[in-house]
Image: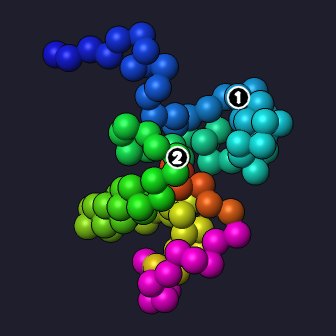
Amino acid sequence: MPRFGKRSRERLIEGKRSQKRQNQLVKEGKSKTKFGLHVMGKAVDIAPYPIDWDARDDFHYLGGFVLGIANRLGYKIRWGGDWNASSLFKGKRTTKDNTFDDLVHFEILD
């Protein structure tokens, strides 16, 4: 079975976080919520590889892909590129209504 090297392990998906890590990210301005779904294990941050933070189209493509697969499997999720899920559940087909983009963030809705 393939194994990740040290460098790859350091760059893996970030899912469940400790409260200490969440507090650190809020302090650094990388997160907006002190008690987020990452702490509860209901959110994950993923990015297309190789990561190019300026390649918005890549993040939107990945976001659409993940949303589509989740929908097909019967999971309701929310993406940080469309917080109010207008493009999926409200029929508005837009992601331009966000005031804060977190294009790597996906969370499971109850």
Examine the image and state in which quarter residue 76 appears. Answer: bottom left
Q: Residue at x 31, y 61 (%)?
A: 65
Question: Camera-side residue: 61 or 40?
Answer: 61
Q: Residue at x 43, y 15 (%)?
A: 7
Name the amino acid type tagged 1: Arg
Whole-number angstrom distance, CA of label 2 to CA of label 1: 22 Å
Image coordinates of residue 27 in percent, x first then y, are: 83, 36
Q: Are marks 2 and 1 in contact (CB under 8 Å)?
A: no
Q: Residues within 10 Å of mark 2 (few under 14, many from 20)?
A: few
Question: Camera-side residue: 20 or 31?
Answer: 31
Q: Residue at x 44, y 40 (%)?
A: 51
Q: Is residue 62 magenta?
A: no
Q: Is residue 63 left or right of residue 2?
A: right
Image coordinates of residue 33 in percent, x first then y, are: 75, 49
Q: Residue at x 36, y 39 (%)?
A: 49
Res. 21 mark: 1
Q: Residues within 10 Å of mark 1 (few under 14, many from 20)?
A: some
Kind of element beneath mark 1:
helix
Nearer-N-terminus badge (2/1)? 1
> From the image, which quarter does the N terminus lie in?
top left
Task: Tell me: residue 52, above or below residue 102.
Answer: above
User: What range of the chain is rendered magenta?
Assistant: 88-99
Q: Is residue 57 left or right of residue 72?
A: right
Would you name the residue on which mark 2 appears?
53
Q: Is residue 74 visible?
A: no
Judge depth for marks 2 and 1 and give the one in front. Answer: 2
Res. 40 mark: none
Kind of element beneath mark 2:
loop
Name the amino acid type tagged 2: Trp
